[in-house]
Image (cartoon, rainbow, N blue to C red):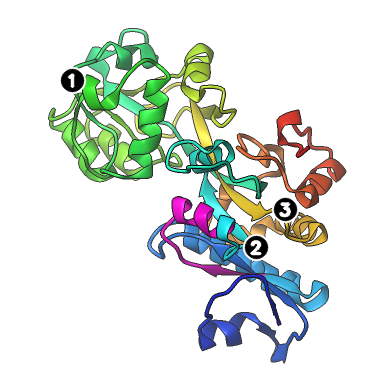
């Protein structure tokens, strides 16, 4: 078997995923797919993609992906730059950092390409209904000096909230009194009056917000993000896109909430064979029920939103598939 990246695979994985019906496929290519820790969503979604490739692509096309755990998006960008990973699941913001050499990424990663958006982190800014004036992010801006929950220290949640609010002229470090906690404790602190607001990005319905709304009927509001606010928060990254949380998603929610979301996306090194990327993209979208049966996060995948918010240009193989099925690909996603 050809190896595109150096890693050790356990005997169990080797036996389970490189064979089908007892047949081992010689002269096949096994690509490394970096995910994150086994306790999160990235790894099981990566495993779903890997399993699909073993079942649908390995027998006939002689290539597949093997999902491995990692320290997450930052480590994945480094691994792809070093050539020890071929594919990776990344937070959209880290893709933007990698493309521009900003934030924690010191140099632009010109090798990085997109395959598809996987699922979205939806921005949910929650404040007490008693403090609602406009019902938009202007209300959050007006709450400078108050206590807020924007995520655990050193978390992606804290990092993305920081970037978004900087677009509105706020510094979360100096303009608010921060409580560092996960989603459940943050919602509890909001309910108990320990903090006055929170930023909880996730895929709705988010359990912590559902519990908050159910236990405190009418007392809390998820803010809308206006188009003008969305543009400021995105900061020309072309990363966050409009997202509607439909009425009834949360207890007592009687109207749609218009907010924004960034993608978690599948990235690939530009050197990976274009035919292989084309076949992987095609196979994923022709077998969504297969992926969705393995992990519910992939329920968010659909061909209409495949390129929404992608932070780096598409790999030529993925671009070929999207053009075949009539997807309108923005110019900035076409590599020069």
The quarter holding residue 164 reads: top left
The C terminus: image quadrant:
top right
Instruction: Name the side, left or right, on which 283 lies relative to 135.
Output: right
Mark drawn on residue 285: 3
Q: Given the current orientation, which residue lies at the most extreme front position?
A: 107
Which residue in the structure is indicated by mark 2?
290
* First to last magenta residue range: 65-80
Q: Earlier in the sequence, mark 1 or mark 3?
A: 1
Mark 3 falls on what kind of element? Answer: helix
Q: Residue 213 at x, y = what percent?
A: 29, 32
Image quarter for residue 51? bottom right
Labels 1, 2: front one? 1
Instruction: Please give left or right for residue 69 compared with residue 319 in the image.
Output: left
Q: Nearer the viewer, residue 106 or 210?
A: 106
* Front position among marks 2 and 3: 3
Mark 1 vs 2: CB contact within 8 A: no
User: Do labels 1 and 3 touch, CB within 8 Å?
Assistant: no
Disc 3 crowd, CA 10 A, few/some/many (<14, 14-19, 20+): some
69 vs 160: above or below: below
14 shown above or below 125? below
Residue 138 in the image: state x and y as whole percent.
36, 11
Residue at 35% across / 33% down in the picture? 251
Disc 1 to disc 3, C-alpha distance: 45 Å
Tag 2 or tag 1, which sits nearer the N-term? 1
Q: Nearer the viewer, mark 1 or mark 3?
A: 1
Q: CA distance from mark 1 to mark 2?
A: 46 Å
* Image height of 269 relative to 260, above or below: below
**Mark 1 highlights which residue?**
146
Q: Which residue lies at the image location 36% right of the left edge and 15% below the top edge?
A: 169
Q: Earlier in the sequence, mark 2 or mark 3?
A: 3
């Amino acid at each position: 078997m050809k190896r595109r990246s150096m890693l050790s695979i356990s005997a169990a994985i080797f036996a389970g995923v490189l064979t089908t019906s007892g047949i081992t496929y010689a002269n096949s290519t096994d690509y490394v797919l970096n995910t994150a820790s086994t306790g999160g969503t990235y790894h099981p979604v990566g495993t779903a993609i890997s399993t699909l490739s073993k079942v649908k692509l390995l027998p006939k096309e002689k290539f597949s992906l093997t999902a491995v755990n990692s320290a997450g998006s930052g480590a994945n960008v480094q691994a792809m730059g070093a050539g020890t990973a071929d594919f990776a699941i990344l937070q959209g913001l880290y893709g933007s950092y990698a493309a521009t050499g900003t934030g924690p990424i010191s140099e632009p990663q010109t090798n990085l390409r997109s395959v598809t958006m996987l699922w979205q982190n939806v921005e949910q800014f929650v404040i007490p209904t008693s403090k609602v004036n406009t019902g938009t992010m202007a209300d959050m801006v007006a709450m400078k000096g108050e206590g807020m929950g924007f995520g655990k220290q050193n978390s992606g949640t804290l990092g993305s909230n920081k970037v978004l609010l900087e677009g509105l002229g706020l510094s979360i470090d100096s303009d608010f009194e921060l409580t560092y906690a996960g989603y459940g404790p943050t919602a509890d602190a909001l309910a108990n009056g320990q903090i006055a607001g929170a930023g909880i990005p996730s895929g709705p319905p988010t359990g912590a917000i559902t519990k908050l709304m159910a236990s405190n009927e009418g007392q809390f509001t998820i803010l809308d993000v206006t188009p003008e606010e969305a543009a400021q928060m995105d900061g020309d990254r072309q990363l966050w896109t409009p997202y509607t949380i439909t009425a009834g998603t949360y207890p007592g929610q009687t109207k749609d909430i218009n907010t924004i979301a960034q993608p978690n996306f599948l990235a690939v090194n530009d050197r990976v064979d274009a035919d292989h990327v084309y076949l992987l993209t095609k196979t994923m979208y022709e077998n969504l029920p297969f992926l969705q049966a393995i992990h519910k996060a992939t329920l968010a995948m659909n061909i209409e939103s495949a390129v929404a918010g992608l932070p780096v240009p598409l790999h030529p193989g993925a671009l070929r598939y999207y053009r075949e099925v009539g997807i309108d690909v923005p110019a900035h996603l076409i590599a020069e």
